[in-house]
Amino acid sequence: MISNRRRIAGMLAALAFAASAAWAGGTHGDNPVGEPGRTEQVTRTINVDMTDNMRFTPAEISVQQGETVRFVVRNSGAVKHELVLATPAELKEHYAMMMKMPGMEHADDNMVTVAPGQTGEIIWRFTKAGKVDFACLQPGHFDAGMKGLVTVAPKAGKPGADGHSGHKH
């Protein structure tokens, strides 16, 4: 019985890792969230504070398309928090997984988990204009409203807000 549980837990963990790696990586630069940035590309640092009142400060952030941002994420609370950049559908799907496997740890480029009193960082390049959501996916935190939004302004001279000719994917 115990070996079956371990085998199932192992399979679920492998599935969760594969799913999170797939959505964090995107395909052919079409990821609406953006892509991991490089330290030498950082144009601005944005400090984000996470607290046990289940809020990010700031919860609304504005950037320019093509900008690479270093998010310095501080956990001012007494419990673990995280910041995950993703689409609303990806956040909801990943949150459902976190509710089933609350001890799951993250190591993807679009997310950082931060222990109480500690600081972490994400370096992210926003490749598409539009909205990019972020949230804390620790059990109960997303439902309590621990969410935020990055507004990505189009780069001057771009043909459309998303760099395409008007159709959506």
Image: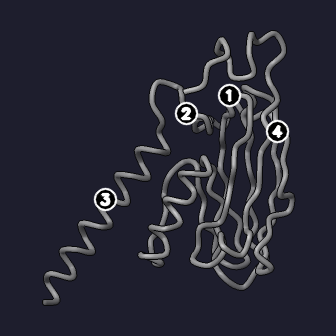
User: Could you tell me which quadrant the C terminus lies in?
Assistant: top right
Tag 3 residue: 15
Contact flag, marks 2 and 1 (Cβ < 8 Å): yes
Q: Who comes first in sequence, dot 2 or dot 4?
A: 2
Q: Is residue 15 left or right of residue 49?
A: left
Distance, label 1 to label 3, CA atoms, is: 28 Å
Q: Who comes first in sequence, dot 1 or dot 4?
A: 4
Distance, label 4 to label 3, CA atoms, is: 35 Å
Tag 2 residue: 31
Q: Is residue 2 left or right of residue 154?
A: left
Q: Who comes first in sequence, dot 1 or dot 3?
A: 3
Circle 1 residues within 10 Å: few <14, some 14–19, many ≥20 = many
Seen at 27% across and 75% down, the residue is 9
x and y percentages locating residue 46 in the rendered image: 82, 49
Seen at 72% across and 85% down, the residue is 78
Q: Who comes first in sequence, dot 2 or dot 1?
A: 2
The amino acid type of the residue labelled 1 equals: Lys
x and y percentages locating residue 117 in the rendered image: 73, 77
Q: Secondary structure at mark 4?
A: strand
The amino acid type of the residue labelled 4 equals: Arg
